Amino acid sequence: MAIARTLAPQPKLVLADEPTGNLDEATADTVFALLCELVSETGAGLILVTHSERLAGRMRRRLHLRAGQLT
């Protein structure tokens, strides 16, 4: 996260493609909390792609891609 903050100190949008895909649950929770903190501190938007229903359930808004259609 420190590298990301150095490279983009004031991002308007954070794109996260499977940021927790290969992590255990505890580490995934930590990474998710760091992303939420970054977004909260900067006022940026967050687009997060995940296969985890558990993680998706923690998002304020969700879109699902099924058979090539966003629902």
Image: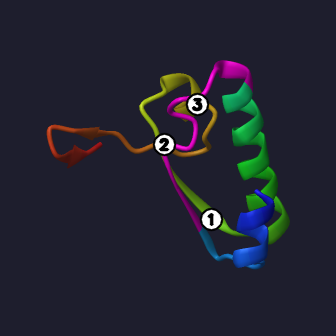
Kindly give the residue lying farthest to the left in the view shown: 67
Determine whether label 1 and label 2 are within 8 Å by CB. Answer: no
Image side of residue 14 versus residue 26, left or right: left
Q: Residue at x 77, y 35 (%)?
A: 30
Give, as a single range, the part of the protein colored magenta: 14-26
Alpha carbon of mark 1 to alpha carbon of mark 2: how far? 16 Å
Q: Which residue matches tag 1?
A: 45
Sequence-first tag of 2 and 3: 2
Q: Which residue matches tag 3?
A: 55
- Quick check: can you spot residue 8? no
> Would residue 64 be counted in the magenta stretch?
no
Snapshot quadrant of residue 6: bottom right
Where does the C terminus fall, quadrant-wise? top left
Determine whether label 1 and label 3 are within 8 Å by CB. Answer: no
- The residue closer to the viewer here, 18 or 70, is 18
Snapshot quadrant of residue 39: bottom right
> Which of the numbered marks, if any, corresponds to residue 18?
2
Q: Residues within 10 Å of mark 2 (few under 14, many from 20)?
A: few
Circle 3: residue type: Leu
In the image, residue 69 above or below residue 7: above
The x, y position of residue 11, in whole percent, is: 68, 76
Image side of residue 34 versus residue 22, left or right: right
In the image, residue 20 above or below residue 6: above
Sequence-first tag of 1 and 3: 1
Circle 2: residue type: Glu
Camera-side mark, 2 or 3: 2
